[in-house]
Image (spheres, rainbow, N blue to C red):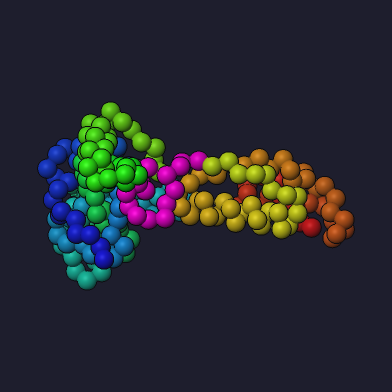
Amino acid sequence: MARKADARAWASTRFAGMPTELSWKIFIDRYTMKDANRAFQPGDLAVVPTREDPRWPQKELAEVLAVDGDRLRVRLLTGEARGEELERSRLSCDRPLETTLAEVAARIGRGVAAVEPDDERRATWARAFAEEIEALRLIPGGRVWAGAGTGLDLTLYNCYVIPSPRDSRQGIVETLGQMIEIMSRGGGVGINVSSLRPFRAPVRSVNGPTQRPSPGWSSTRWRRG
């Protein structure tokens, strides 16, 4: 069941506690929990698309003015067109359940303090972490911002280095599977693919050369065989 967001909590502090408009926008878009049902109400904060480009899409923050079925009427709060009113599909927009730095700091504090052995220590350390994060004296990694305290199966590590793939079809597939599992939980993957033979090396099993890189591995050497 979706947690109810305070429709106007974001408006009580300039940039909801973040130092700049850009940091506010990035923070809300990337590091807050979202309502999977997109149950928008007037006064809600929304992340809305303003440029539908497959390579360089753009989003801005907006206040929801009206909800009409699957259509939203919003007023932009960020960007060059700030103050402009737009209509957008409800499904194209995200509804943050956390709209201020204080809310996210409290959630992270609870998450990292959960390892403490008793309620008193958990409360003490949750409060201590939350205070440091809200004051921006402690800046966690991006995956901690996004995942700590959510109860979701997300990684709290930003980056992983995984073993080089074996030089075979099965080896490549196994490595891709590892990458998919890590990336689906928010982690980034670094990998050394020098274990794969170079472009146009012979592949005896098919009597042909290796192929050019696959679109998904554009910076690697790829082969068939």
Q: Residue at x 63, y 49 (%)?
A: 217
Q: In x, y percent, where is residue 48?
A: 29, 54
The verdict on residue 122 being magenta is: no
User: Relative to 192, is 197 on the left or the right?
Assistant: right
Instruction: Let me know if residue 150 is in the magenta part.
Output: yes
Q: Main secondary structure of the magenta part?
A: loop
Is 39 left or right of 114, judged from the image as shown? left
Q: Nearer the viewer, residue 160 or 7?
A: 160
Which corner quadrant of the image does residue 79 belong to? top left
Quadrant in the rendering for residue 204: bottom right
Near-viewer residue (20 or 17): 17
Residue 165 visible here: yes
The N terminus is located in which quarter? bottom left
The residue under the point 44% across, 48% down is 155
Return the x and y of residue 88 as percentages of the image width and height: 27, 61
Instruction: Tell me which residue sits at (27%, 45%) in the image.
Output: 118
Question: What residue occupies the far top of the structure in this picture?
Answer: 137
Residue 182 placement (x, y as % from top left): 52, 51
Q: Nearer the viewer, residue 46 or 181?
A: 181
Check the image and report above or below for 33 versus 40.
Answer: above
| Rendered view: 133 above or below 42 | above
Q: Which residues are magenta?
A: 144-159
